[in-house]
Amino acid sequence: QINCIGYIFPNQGPAGVIQLRALLAERLPVPSVIIRVNERLLRNQIWFESSDIASPPLNPKSRLLLFGDAATSGTSIYKAALIAQNFGAKCDTAFVIYDRQQGAKEKLHPKGIKLNSFWNKEMFVERGELEKQDIDVKSSRVEFESIKSAIDP
């Protein structure tokens, strides 16, 4: 059972993730954290509420659900899972609003992370809402493979 939600904070900035966190916090009765996937200092990778500092929600008993806006290569999701694991949390499930279907699900699965999405590219293709140029876009992102622990068995 999930007892914490980790919102993935990628490069784009905090506005979207903070709004998303606020919206879901009203509806989900579990603590949440913001995980800064591109922060290099361990102490700054996880953002807690000031009231959580005495008893942070990430610890070896934590079961974390990752939540993000979109999945492309899976890199940000995997980095967030590694950060959570550094705090002792178990993290094997991620939800995104939109899966671009550019390999994230296939790359995360062998790492023990199940990726779920509310919408994906295939849904929009079937409804005829994407043009050919949108469908044929190939990701040039290869960061997933550049994470040493992502490619080690």
Image (cartoon, rainbow, N blue to C red):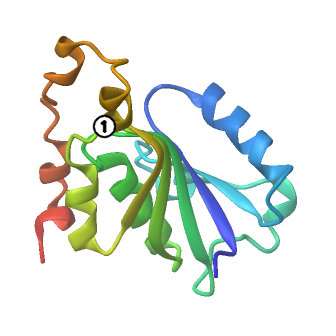
Q: Is residue 106 above or below residue 149?
A: above
Q: Which residue is mark 1?
A: 122
Residue appearing at x 62%, y 87% in the figure: 61
Q: Please identify the quadrant where the C terminus is shown.
A: bottom left
Residue most toward the front?
127
Residue extending farthest to the bottom is 61
Quarter location, residue 133: top left
The crowding category of the residue bearing disc 1, from other C-alpha atoms within 10 Å (few below 14, some 14 to 19, many at least 20), is: some
* Residue at position x 68%, y 38% in the image: 20
How many numbered marks are there?
1
On the image, the x and y values in percent for residue 68 come to: 51, 45
Q: Position of residue 96 (x, y in %)?
A: 48, 46
Where is 29 relative to 89, above or below? above
Could you say which quadrant of the image residue 86 lies in? bottom left
Please determine whether, in this image, residue 63 is positioned above or below residue 61: above
Which quadrant is the N terminus positioned in?
A: bottom right
Q: Residue at x 13, y 22 (%)?
A: 136
> Is residue 76 found left or right of 27 in the rendered image?
left
Please name the amino acid that badge 1 sits on.
Answer: Glu
Secondary structure of the residue carrying numbered label 1: helix
Residue depicted at x 62% and y 36% = 17
Looking at the picture, how far across and down is residue 39, in whole percent? 44, 44
Image coordinates of residue 91 in percent, x first then y, are 47, 72
Please tell me which residue lies in front, 113 or 46. Answer: 113
Residue 56 lies left or right of residue 1; in this view the side is: right
